[in-house]
Amino acid sequence: MSDRLSAVDSSFLYLEDYTTPMHVGGVAVFRRPRSGFDYDKVLSLIDRRLGLVPRYRQRVMEVPGGLARPVWVDDQDFDLTYHVRRSALPKPGSDDQLHDLVARLMSRKLDPTRPLWELYLVEGLSKNRVAVITKTHQAMVDGIGAIDIGQVIYDTEKDRDLGDEDDLWMPRPQPRVAELLVEAVTDAVKSPGEVVENARAAAVDVTATAQKVGRALGGVASALRTAIVPAPAGPLNAPTTTQRRFAVAKAKLEDLRAVRNAHGTTVNDVVLAVVTGALRNWLLSRGEVVSPSTTLRAMVPVSVNAGDAEAAATYWDTASLPVGAIGNKVSAYLVDLPVGEGNPTVRLHQVSHAMRAHAESGQSVAAGALVRVSGFAPPTLHALGARVANQFSDRLFNVLVTNVPGPQVPLYAAGAKMMEMFPVVPLAKNQSLSVGITSYDGGVYFGLNADRDAMPDLGVLASMVGEAIDEMIGTVDA
């Protein structure tokens, strides 16, 4: 029996077009060790561990006529050097040059005839640094139990042995067309409604597909209760083009925790208040009308665990749950960010109140538990957040904000220490900005992915995130 894509996974193939590629990305910056950290070493590391993620050697194969959902098949001509690529900046490469490269790479769709992932080693960075950029299609992310390529190459020990050479991999024979058709007919007899749904999906009936995504991911009802009226119109909902911009901002986790302790909120609330303050100043810099009642609606995906109310108020705090209690559901919270509020303390408490109302009904999972779900959880969880966002109309929210806690210990790849990590969350249709946030080893890292035409001033917004962080820290002593 073929390994058929789930309804959710196949939907992301149908929803994808050249203006909205459906891959999630990440940027990890490493300090080059004395032993070196070059392309051959990275290629060898991935080659030795790729057996841990069999999906990364598989590609999607369509069923003729769209009679059934596509299937995963082993890539008969799998070429690791195609997926693991080498790039370089002119020495000494700056962070801005790296971010420009990230934007260009994220603008391009993955090749649907090959396994749906790419990894780039970027050399030439200043201060003896190198970067690793990853792209993974959302069709490959089937829940929190999925393993991201980063989980395979990152270690918590600097000198961990790379492991023995992987046994020679031999692809399984590709199924014949006749076999796929027989299986499709068999499935149709068991579930006749699937035939109609698959045919409509093959014709890119994105409305029906998005509804299926919503049912599978969960959390739709909670979000729709917030979205009684459409999201406010504004510059964040321009038509999406093919090109992107990327910018970053950073904070210290201890500073955000100090704000949390001073105001009795959560770190997640503080982060959202920072984003709110930055968006407020960005709107003002553009000459937009901002009144005391002005809001922007954020889609805030949060991992949920049905039936565990104690976790509800602890998201991004230090409380934890048994790993076995975690599910793979992501709830879509739609939160009206009070960008019209000029007082940062009042702004924080308004955001906290809105998130608490969601948490009490949604059973959000504690941050400590998320970190231990599968080791290095952030890439998978950011991808799940992007997946749930794509089920909604662009009229329901203005900006996607995914906030995922990461490990608070150093990570290494082939002996090189990771210094920073920034998520790159894809844009939904007619969305101009997505903000991914991840904590790692005492830092909080903001990755801002934006439409190139709609947001030529993304760098201004990134600098305003830094200003909003300083403003929020200033409330501790106020």
Image (spheres, rainbow, N blue to C red):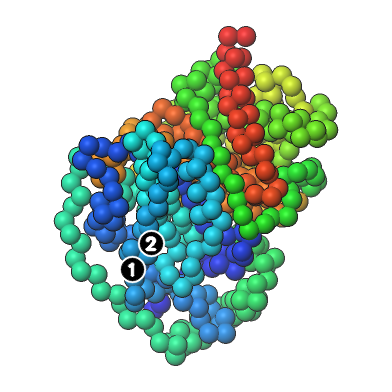
Q: Which residue is mark 1?
A: 79
**Tags 1 and 2 in contact by the CB under 8 Å rule?**
yes
Label 1: state its secondary structure: loop
**Amino acid type, mark 2:** His
Left or right position of 102 against 394? left
**Which residue appears farthest toward the bottom when viewing the image?**
178
Q: Position of residue 151 (x, y in %)?
A: 35, 48
Which quadrant is the N terminus positioned in?
A: bottom left
Left or right position of 247 against 357? left
Task: Tell me the CA gap for discs 1 and 2.
Answer: 7 Å
Q: Which residue is mark 2?
A: 83
Image quarter for residue 215?
bottom right
Compared to 270, does 20 lie above or below? below
Label 2: state its secondary structure: helix
Q: Position of residue 59 (x, y in %)?
A: 42, 71
Residue drawn at (45%, 34%), measured in percent from left and top? Answer: 439
Query: Can residue 366 be seen?
Result: no
Q: Position of residue 254 (x, y in %)?
A: 46, 21
Q: Which is nearer the eye, 432 or 387?
A: 432
**Amino acid type, mark 1:** Asp
